[in-house]
Amino acid sequence: MIALALDFAFACFGAAMLMNMWVVAAGRTVEDRILALDTMVINAIALLILHGIWAGTAVFFEAAMIIAMLGFVSTVAYARFILRGNIIE
Amino acid sequence: MELLFASAVGLLTACGIYLILRRRSFPVIIGLSLLSYAVNLFLFASGRLAVNRPPLLHEGAAGYTDPIPQALVLTAIVISFGMTAVIVMIALSDHLTSRDDRVDAPAGGAADDGVEAPAAQEDAR
Amino acid sequence: MRLIRALFPHPTLSLLLTAVWVAMANTFTINSLVLGAMLGVAIPIFTRAYWPDRPRLRSPLRVAEYAAVVLWDIVMANIAVARLVLFRRNADLRPAWIAVPLDLRHPEAITALAGTITMTPGTVSCDVSSEGRALLVHCLHAPDPDAVRDEIKQRYERRLMEIFE
Amino acid sequence: MSQAAEILIAASLAVGGVFGLVGSYGLIKLPNLVMRLHAPTKATTLGVGGVLIASMLHSWFALGRFSVHELLITMFLFLTAPVTAHFIAKAHIHRRLSARDLPAPQVDRGWATLERPEDGSPDGDPGEKAEGAQPGGGN
Amino acid sequence: MSHLPVLPIVLPAALAAFILMTMRHHLELQRIFSIAGSVALTAIAALLVARASDGQVHVYELGDWPAPFGIALALDRLSAMMVALTALLLLAVTLYAVGAGWDARGRHFHALLQFQAMGVCGAFLTADAFNLFVFFEILLIASYGLMIHAGGAERLRAGFQYVAYNLLGSTLFLFAMGALYAATGTLNMADLGVRIAQLPAEHAALARAGAALLILVFAVKAAALPVHFWLPGAYAAAPGPSAAMFAILTKVGVYAILRMRATAFPESAPALAGLSEAWLLPAALATALIGAAGVLGARGMARLAAFGTIASVGTLLIAAALFTPQSAAAALYYMPHSTLAAAVMFLAADMVTERRGDAIAPGPRMAHHALVAAVFFLGAVALAGLPPLSGFLGKLMIMDAARGHERVAWIWGVILVASLITLMGLARAGSDVFWRPAEGEGRAENREQDEDDAAAGPGPAAPAQPSAALTFVAAFALLAALAALTVLAGPAMRYADAAVAQLFDAGAYADAVLRRP
Amino acid sequence: MSLFLIAALPFLGAVLPALLVRASRNAAAGTAAGATALALIGVLTHAPAVMRGEVPMARAPWVPSLGLNANLMLDGLGLLFALLILGIGLLIILYARFYLTRRDPMGKFYALLLLFQGAMLGIVLSDNILMLLIFWELTSLSSFLLIGYWNHLPEGRQGARMALTVTGAGGLAMIAGALLLGQAAGSMELSDIIARREAVQASELYLPALILILAGCFAKSAQFPFHFWLPHAMAAPTPVSAYLHSATMVKAGLFLMARLWPALAGTDAWFLLAASVGLITMVLGAVTALFKDDLKGLLAYSTVSHLGLVTFLLGLGTPAGAVAAVFHIINHATFKAALFMTAGIVDHETGTRDIRRLGGLAAFMPVTFLIGAVAALSMAGVPPLNGFLSKEMMLHEAAHTAWLGSELALPVLAGLAALFSAAYSFRFVAHVFLGKPRLAHAEPPHDPVVWFWLPPAILASLTVLIGLFPQSMAGELVRAAAGAVTAGAAPEIKLKLWHGVNEALMISAAALAGGAAALALHGPLARVWAVVAPPAAKRAFDALVGAATAAARRLTDALHDGDFGRSAAIFSVFAAGLGAWAWTAGGAAPLGAFPAALGPTPPIPLIGWVCLVTATLTLTALHRHRLLALVLIGVTGLMVSLTFSYFSAPDLALTQISVEVVSIILLLLALNFMPRETPRESSAARRARDLAAAAAAGLGVGAAIYAILVGDFAFAPISEFHLANSKTGGGGENVVNVILVDFRGFDTFGEITVLGIAAVLIYALTETIMAGPVRARLLNRRPAEPQAGDAHPMMMVVATRVLMPIALTVAVYIFLRGHNAPGGGFIAGLIVSVAFVMQYMASGFSWAAARQRYPYHAFIGLGVLVAAATGMGAWFNGKPFLTSDFGYVKLPGLEKFELATAALFDLGVFLTVLGAVLLALESLARYAWRPNIASAHPMDIDPTRDEAAQREEGR
Ligand code: NA
Ligand code: NA
């Protein structure tokens, strides 16, 4: 049952990833693409954790945590760039 | 899977090279970044790929993937990060100094003042 | 007293960091607790300059209550919004901008409110006003925007006022 | 592992998957950026949340390993997601909206993003502290 | 336990770090420490040469891990000689930079110079192929800093190209490294050699491609055709002393070719037979010719020196391509010559540029700068490979070594024709720069014009010259080294022969590095 | 006196005048003369022995492996030349002291002259052909400087370059020839080569060696078709011409022909080449000389002609010819040097060398006239002067030799040359000294001081003495020299004035008469000559050099035109091609069966692949939109990091993510100052080219990695050792980290150095840029696009206040755990850096940096030093650099801790990374810095602050 649910979750987040990719590649505005990238990062975290469950290991935790902690910095940087040009004025 | 990996690395290389051949510093830098992804993956794969075999020693492990390429890639990533920072700064400084971000040097590259001449021309004076 | 303040510029933060450390170590051992506590003391001292004014948390109990409310709302709102996204045609959605005037004054408090608004699906806090006395919130589907504003003020801001001010 | 634990884990996974998918689907489906901005919140909250809970439960019940560090990821997401949404919204407002598109804040003269500073910071008093704080001076 | 082999790496690194940490704002202190460090490095190098002269390969296992698992340094005659050359050049360049005031035109010149020395010495000493990559990167990134030192539009543009091109080179290095590791599962050069020699046929293709590409990377560093394009612009735009220091960088490439071909890619291995020479020799010949043509066609002094460097590297590469014991010995003799001669030429170019601008065109006459003229003339003699300086002997040796090669006519022809073209170019430049008066020289408005140019242009005018004497000391020290190389050609050649015998004895190298009984 | 000392004396003498640049003219001349005289005495001490047939030697090995040795010998030929070089040198030194004016730097002149003298002496004393080559080239170099002595004159510069080019080219041919000859003879020693005639001439290398050596000799001795440089070398000061271009340098080619005569002469090839070229040169030079109006031009062509004569004699390959050649070398040296000096005196006194403007000088300058007349008549071959004797010998040989199958050709042509020789010699006397004076002088010219005319007078008297008493004056010397040239085959000769009436005498008489007639008809003949004269070789040479220079410039400029794209494309294609060639050249390149190692592809990697490929392709297609490119590269980076994760490389994934963030920050910071769009500026053809190059590289890399993945290691990889020893030897479970900080810690040491250098470089660059004009431009810069309000939003500031301490905690964790779990100093450093970046983004750089207590430089320096010191710590244990140690510590109340020196090393890594990233960012931030962006507050909008302000106001 867990295996099935795992496959289901993989499928969901995988499909989500593809949808994100679609928006990143063909989004109408840069803000859309940034948003999609940010979502993609979140989906990636989910995939990493799922992979950890599947493999029965915690070695992916650090990667997921770092993505969660640092991923937003680049998103903010993109947005700040649009807002101000200079991102660390 | 091998084909997927190989085609991705090949594509990264090709796109990297294509961007490097553009005439402005910014795409060149982006191209170099793509190229460094490609080479990192290449070097990484030189130890062959394995799923769920991280080289973290623990009891009952089914096996470990080759840790050497990982260490090499880590070194390579760090170095290429330093290099990227440097080339970004040089490109920026160049842009600020010469007010354009072209990659190509002005024709000749050398001081073009005073085309002088071989003996024959001098003689003509 | 001054010594204590110098050692614990942000006591709550110190606790948080200790907890983070223990969670990260993922084992509740003496070692991790001691080390976590050491960091909980050291790091706030090290970063004190970047967090100059100390917000006071009035009541830890209220914090827990607030967290529970928010978590519940998140679950509920998630379901509601998922239904909106999945089953309602875009044309039937009634998005709205609302301005939420603030009684909160502390940046930490305002941020907590804005964060709460965003994390509960259906509303996103998009901007603050020029003097920081109002939040600009976007609602995905708000046939009655004023009700949303009032609920925000009632449900979240009021609780935060109690925690922070 | 008990049947209940298995069901719990599977359910968490399923819930996580569904909300993750809905979040990204919304990103495609919804008609404009501010509306799309609502979608990913689901992925960050219940989507990832479900997976993290599943992971914790799986550690406890399937692997017999105490694990709470997944909570940290949730904490980070809760800390950062509002900020990113805020910034993306601000970028959108800056790029594509004007004061007419938005309700007036009433208590203040306008929205911060739309305040067009003459030059740089709206924060008045230039110069005076500036010299002392020039970066690189001390290095 | 003697730690001598690691000192040429650790000393400059620690010194540079120390300079960064404690004397960022004290140029005088930096100068003192930098010069002292260079002197110390020279002394260490002398000890290394003495140590290496016993004919043993001295292995230093870093971290006390045996090769090939850990990284080992290997000191033999060849590496000792190259370190000594580096130290000598570093000392002269440091003195020149101080004398000419170049170190005051930007920040951190001395730290970068020391880092450069660290990278170069490391490249010469390491016995590990990936560690070689790391040292390549160190020497490269230091050279980026030295190249763009003092800024200016032309320099920065050239700098960008230099960095970008070398990043391509570094990338190729990693590709090649990956292929080699994938084929052999090792990184140590000696171990690579041992394994490649036993490589089963089905793995040969990968090893061949890796080996060929790695040699290509070294050819890039050496500036061989058609991957030399990075050099002229970069070296010409670099500050004089930086360019002079860079004279050793191309030699790192040649060194690596020699070392790798002898140690890691033995021609005796069936997989690699005839692999390198097939393309390296034509490339070397073309390099010599294009370098010579560049000298003849150069419009500026710095570019002249840059193409002169290419020409001499081409000649050197011919010897490296032939790769017989005799040709390798000739290469080892020609190597210091080529380095020092190119360095002198860059210093001469800088001296001229500081006084009358870079252009090889009528300008203020240099007739009264007899010392500058002497530096240029002697440098030109060296670079063109004319007697009495060592270049002539080196070329003779290389030609002598090419006897019996099936393409001897090509080799001799190219060496001689390239010499002639170089000679013509240098004579033209020398007579135009030092002899030929400007049109209407002496007219007042002309002089004003010059002053305006000087004020507007980058570089020359700005700082006062602290000590012209020091610049001449540096230049003449290099020339004296060239003279010594000539007079002591006999002992030098004996050393080179011994070094080559050691280099070609891959078995002994592997025995020492891999601790084989 | 040792031959070494003799050879060294001129060089020592060259140093002294060079050092005496500022000393008096007499001092310079005196030292030069002293050195020369000393050397001359040295040579003379050996003369008796040499005359006896002994060959004094001095030998010293130099580069034995090359066959190059500093071996000197003094045989008859060497003695003859040494005497000429030093004897005439002495006269020239005296002459030049009065010839040069006060404006000419005397010290430099004598230094160069002695340098040349030394080189020349070296040639004639060498017993080693490579040694000879060295001196040979040295004469070219020193003569370049001497000809260009008056370098303010264009003629001087051009003449010098032409001479250098021609003789230099000849010298290079000589190098090849000498090497071949040495190979054929099996020795580089001249004495050996001479002794191995049969071996040399039998060798297949003989002909190429002969051609190359003769080419060198002809170029040096101004033989047709290389003769044209000599007249242009007349731009040199006259003492130089008199020395180099009559007595010494131009004779070097003849010397070498004579030197190698025993080994090379006597074959048809030798005869055909040398005799023919000599003959042609002799005639051509003589004819041309007659029509030169420049006094030195006339002498130059006459020299060409006489050199041709000697070449012709040597080319005959007969002992008698060799004797005549040797004798004529002596005679020519005496009369020609005298003539040059005379011409110099005339020039010096009248201010012109144009024969058309001269005339009747005999009346004003009787001594000069006498000297000139005697020397010129000797040159004309008028008895009883010495020129007559050797010319007779030449004519005699010509009359008895067939050439190109004709018995008559040689006597006729030789006679013709003699005729013109007589004609121009007569002209030298008649048109300069006789006839009416043509120059209107304010002050009539007069004979110079005695020291000035003494040198030519001595030489002129020698022509008389040798002519009258040939055997006693020169007989022994000629015998000895000829004996050396012919290797003892010279006939027993007796030089005498009168040989009776023979063909030679008849031809000679006819030539003299014809010469007188030709002079009488000079005017009409000159008009004819103007029409039929062969084109000036100089023009062809100039055109050639000019074309070569232009071509070289065009080629190199076109190739090195700063087009980065092209050079990079060439690199890519060449690398791909080389790799493919190397791959296939070995024949077998099996790819193996289709793989199953990794099994069938699960969907998740496929999705990752789709994302990676889509992002990369989209990025490439849309790269002009730069911000978008950065967003897309973020996706690519994320996918790469997920790839690392998937394939069991958690450390790589962590590193990749952290580096990605910092890189994007860096690029965004830079993009702020750059155009937001890349213009469309590549032609379709260029894009196609670039696509092709890209495809080549991509295919190559893809194929290689595919081959790698489907194959396996041929040998067990070294990493088995690392896996086995990581825990026991390195004390860590994370093998990658143990490799980084222990097994291969030296790589890491280098890697952090790179990072440190990068930051230092960036800092230095920024300092430089900000010290220049860019600073003002930046300060006046307006934002590229309108800026939004609220530069430091409250939410970000507050989030950072919480996140930064947590991030530091995480960094500590990652750092400490790195040895056993994914992480380590590098990633920790990056996390802390990003934490600071967060802070900078939140509250602005100025605000944050003002709270930063430690200079980043110190971090970098400290990091490298800590790493180095950790490495050196092992020295005190008697272990190599970077040897690690670890142990477990138990503190009361706590579980055991592991302490490893590797952690200290990792701390160095951490510090360097942190310092480097922050220094780089700080430097970038300096570009953006303007006085008004510094903020006093962490956030722009803060209601509490406003309320506090209002309270303040209200009070
Ligand atoms: Na929300
Ligand atoms: Na330069």
Image (tube, coloured by chain):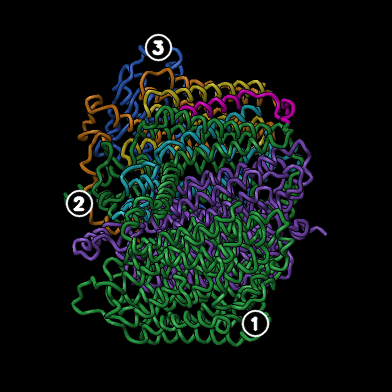
Question: Could you classify mark 1 by the number of other residues whose Cα lies within 10 Å: few (under 14), some (14-19), or many (20 or more)?
Answer: many
Of E270 and C154, which appears nearest the observer? Answer: E270
Q: In the image, which lettered chain appears cyan?
A: B
Q: Nearer the viewer, mark 2 or mark 1?
A: 1
Q: Residue E227, position in %: x, y?
A: 53, 45
Q: In the image, which lettered chain appears orange?
A: D
Q: In the image, which lettered chain appears blue?
A: C
In this view, which residue lies farthest toward the left? Answer: F954
Of F283 and E452, which appears nearest the observer? Answer: F283
Question: Could you classify mark 2 by the number of other residues whose Cα lies within 10 Å: few (under 14), some (14-19), or many (20 or more)?
Answer: few
Quadrant location, the N terminus of chain F:
bottom right
Chain letter for mark 1, please: F
* Image height of F612 relative to E225, above or below: above
Q: Residue at x 70, y 44 (%)?
A: E274
Magenta-span inclusion, residue F597: yes
Residue bearing mark 3: C89
Check whether the beta carbons of the residues at disc 1 and disc 3 lie within 8 A of each other. no
Q: Residue at x 44, y 29 (%)?
A: F687
Q: Residue at x 44, y 62 (%)?
A: F286
Of F468 and E14, which appears nearest the observer? Answer: F468
Camera sees residue B100: yes
Instruction: Give amino acid for label 3.
Output: Arg
Q: Which residues are magenta?
A: F590-619
Check whether the beta carbons of the residues at disc 2 and disc 1 lie within 8 A of each other. no
Q: Quadrant of ligand 2?
A: bottom left
Q: Determine whether, in the image, residue D130 is placed left or right of residue E288.
A: left
Residue bearing mark 1: F50
